[in-house]
Structures are given as structure tokens and as C-alpha cells.
């Protein structure tokens, strides 16, 4: 099995792919969203109702794009964006503009998700960049997700989990399945994370061959 990569290594690969290979960040985001959406629809196509919960970073942008693709496939999708949109990444802004043009339902509040009854909740609040305890409004949202009776799926990594250690900072989403993007995370080697990740499925999104970025990996 290929060893798990640290958050630092994955960020270095992203930077190299975008700036040296020349694949734009928004293209990687779209590829990630397509891969996750295809996986979700292949396994959960019988479900019609989805809530996608997004932050304002690039993991959130992945989530917005996933919500849009599910919407375009004919599913009923509610999109929750949590956080200060003025601080959203450029790629997430682009995805939100597209979603609005398609007249999607977008909530910019931390409404009580536990009162809603979707078949599927997709967690795209935080990605591998999280390195601290989760605070409100995100903390309340994670608790509401976990209190829901819906099937919970995570994009890349469950929000609140360390990508490097697999340890929960203070609270984390408890997913039935995690669709991790591109690379197995180092923290997934810690079996203590399994109640939060559930089954982990690694999705390819078109990163260059390993020989192109091998020099970026830290020696073990």
C-alpha cells in the first residue's frame, strides 16, 4: 500500500501541479467534484434529497461544485455555505457564481440541520488545512450533522479530523464513507480515525504521474 501523505506534501503537490505543470486550480476542483459526484451517484442514486454543507475554503468549493453536479443530475439539493464569504477562496467564489446562475437553493446560515430530513448529507466544511480545534459556527454545524439520521458522506476528509495524525481536534464529522481526493492521507493510517472516516475511497482526479512530484515528498 502506498504510504499516506501529509497535508504539507499534498499542498506542495497541488502547488507544483498548478504552477509548474499548468493545470489551473479550478480545473482540479472541477475534476474532484466530478469524481466525487460520480462515486456518490453510483452508490446512492436511489436517494433524491441531498444537503451539501460547505466552508469557504477550497474543500468548500469542491462541495459547491458537487452540489451543482447533483442538482444538474436531477437531485433535490440544498446547499449550506458556512463562514464569511468575503474570505472565501477565489475558486469557491467561482463555484458559487455558477450555482447562483443555475438558481440553486443556497443558505448562508448555520441553520439547524438536525431538523431537516435529507437522505444524504455531504460534508465539505474543512479539508486538510485544518490544524486547530473547531469553533462556532462550525462546531454547532458539525454537531448537527452528527445528530442527523441522514447518511453522512465526507469530501476528502471528515471535517474536524487531522490529516496528519488522524486525531480529532475537539469534534469531527462521523461519516459513513469518505471520498478522499487524489492521495491517501497520513492520518488515515491511525485506526482511531475510522469511526469518523467510515469506509475510505481514494479518487483519482488527474494529478501528474508520481515521477513528476517525487522530489516534493518528505523522506520518511
Image (cartoon, rainbow, N blue to C red):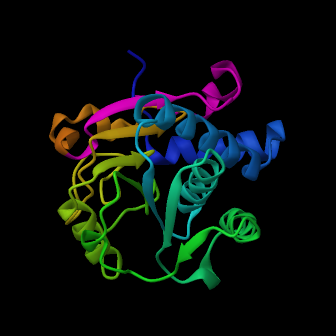
Residue 83 sits inside the magenta stretch: no
Would you say residue 55 is visible in this rendering? yes
Q: Nearer the viewer, residue 9 or 85?
A: 85
Instruction: State whether residue 14 is above or below residue 199.
Output: below
Q: Is residue 47 left or right of residue 96?
A: left
Q: Nearer the viewer, residue 172 or 188?
A: 172
Q: Position of residue 113 (x, y in %)?
A: 31, 71
Residue 210 sits inside the magenta stretch: yes
**Span colored in magenta:** 196-220
Residue at (80, 48) in percent of width and height:
24
- Residue found at the very far right of the displayed protein: 22
Q: Is residue 195 left or right of residue 135?
A: left
Residue at (67, 19) in percent of width and height:
211
Residue at (31, 50) in percent of width and height:
152
Count how many numbered circles sit on residues in the image. 0
Q: Position of residue 49 (x, y in %)?
A: 43, 54
Would you say residue 219 is visible in this rendering? no
Instruction: State whether residue 80 is above or below residue 38.
Output: below
Q: Nearer the viewer, residue 54 or 163?
A: 54
Q: Position of residue 57 (x, y in %)?
A: 56, 65
- Residue found at the very far top of the displayed protein: 1
Instruction: State whether residue 5 is above or below residue 214.
Output: below
Q: Position of residue 36 (x, y in %)?
A: 53, 39
Q: Is residue 8 left or right of residue 189?
A: right
Indicate the quadrant containing the C terminus: top left, top right, bottom left or bottom right: top left
Q: Nearer the viewer, residue 172 or 5?
A: 172
Amino acid at each position: 500500500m502506498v504510504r499516506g501523505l501529509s497535508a504539507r506534501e499534498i499542498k506542495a503537490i497541488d502547488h507544483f501541479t498548478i504552477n509548474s505543470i499548468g493545470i489551473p486550480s479550478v480545473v482540479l476542483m472541477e475534476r474532484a467534484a466530478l469524481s466525487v459526484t460520480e462515486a456518490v451517484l453510483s452508490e446512492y442514486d436511489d436517494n433524491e434529497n441531498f444537503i451539501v454543507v460547505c466552508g469557504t475554503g477550497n474543500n468548500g468549493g469542491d462541495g459547491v461544485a458537487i452540489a451543482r453536479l447533483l442538482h444538474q443530475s436531477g437531485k433535490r439539493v440544498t446547499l449550506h455555505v458556512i463562514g464569511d464569504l468575503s474570505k472565501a477562496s477565489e475558486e469557491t467564489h467561482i463555484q458559487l457564481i455558477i450555482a447562483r446562475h443555475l438558481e440553486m437553493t443556497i443558505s448562508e446560515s448555520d441553520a439547524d440541520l438536525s431538523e431537516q430530513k435529507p437522505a444524504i448529507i455531504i460534508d465539505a466544511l474543512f479539508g486538510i488545512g485544518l490544524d486547530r480545534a473547531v469553533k462556532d459556527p462550525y462546531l454547532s454545524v458539525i454537531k448537527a450533522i452528527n445528530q442527523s439520521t441522514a447518511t453522512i458522506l465526507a469530501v476528502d476528509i471528515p471535517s474536524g479530523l487531522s490529516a496528519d495524525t488522524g486525531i480529532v481536534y475537539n469534534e469531527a464529522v462521523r461519516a459513513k464513507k469518505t471520498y478522499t481526493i487524489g492521495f491517501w492521507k497520513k492520518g488515515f493510517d491511525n485506526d482511531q480515525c475510522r469511526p469518523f472516516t467510515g469506509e475510505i475511497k481514494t479518487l483519482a482526479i488527474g494529478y501528474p504521474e508520481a515521477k513528476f512530484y517525487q522530489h516534493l515528498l518528505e523522506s520518511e
